[in-house]
Image (tube, rainbow, N blue to C red):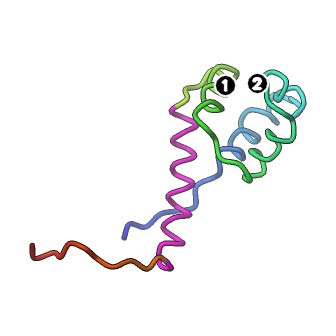
Amino acid sequence: MPSIHSPSHPGQILDELYIKPHHLTITEVAEALGVARKNLYAVIKGEYSISVEMAFKLSKAFDTTPEFWLQAQLNFDLARGYKESKNIKVKRLIKDDE
């Protein structure tokens, strides 16, 4: 199993690299993105994942790419999945010797 570090949630990246350095408020960003303030706040707090639509909105608002935001979400989800995978019990269907 690969060793996976704990990458930041994309909401934390949004807050630390884009919102705070540019002295933006959550209300300003939410209005610019056309999303509810409470939903943006939930993204920033890591309670909501970045959707494809949100990735496109963020890419247009902050001159990034949707791939940047979706890759950040994927990295976060995979790291969490690796940590939780030890609790997943399934029956192996294909054997190594086949």
Q: Position of residue 59 (x, y in %)?
A: 62, 25
Q: Residues within 10 Å of mark 2 (few under 14, many from 20)?
A: some
Residue 56 to residue 93: above or below: above
Residue 6 to residue 97: above or below: above
Q: Name the residue type under label 2.
A: Leu
Q: Residue at horizontal 86%, vertical 41%?
A: 38
Q: Position of residue 60 (x, y in %)?
A: 64, 19
Q: Residue at horizontal 66%, vertical 25%?
A: 57
Mark 2: which secondary structure?
Answer: helix
First of labels 1, 2 by sequence position: 2
Horizontally, residue 43 falls left or right of residue 96, namely right
1 and 2 marks in contact (CB < 8 Å)? yes
85 in magenta: yes
Q: Which residues are magenta?
A: 67-87
Q: Residue at horizontal 47%, vertical 78%?
A: 86
Q: Residues within 10 Å of mark 1 (few under 14, many from 20)?
A: some
Residue at mark 1? 57
80 in magenta: yes
Q: Nearer the viewer, residue 37 or 92?
A: 92
Q: Residue at horizontal 79%, vertical 33%?
A: 19
Residue at mark 2? 33
Q: Position of residue 14 (x, y in %)?
A: 71, 38
Horizontally, residue 75 falls left or right of residue 63, namely left
Q: Position of residue 20 (x, y in %)?
A: 82, 36
Q: Nearer the viewer, residue 4 or 95?
A: 95
Horizontally, residue 80 falls left or right of residue 39, namely left
Mark 1: which secondary structure?
Answer: helix
Tally of numbered tags: 2
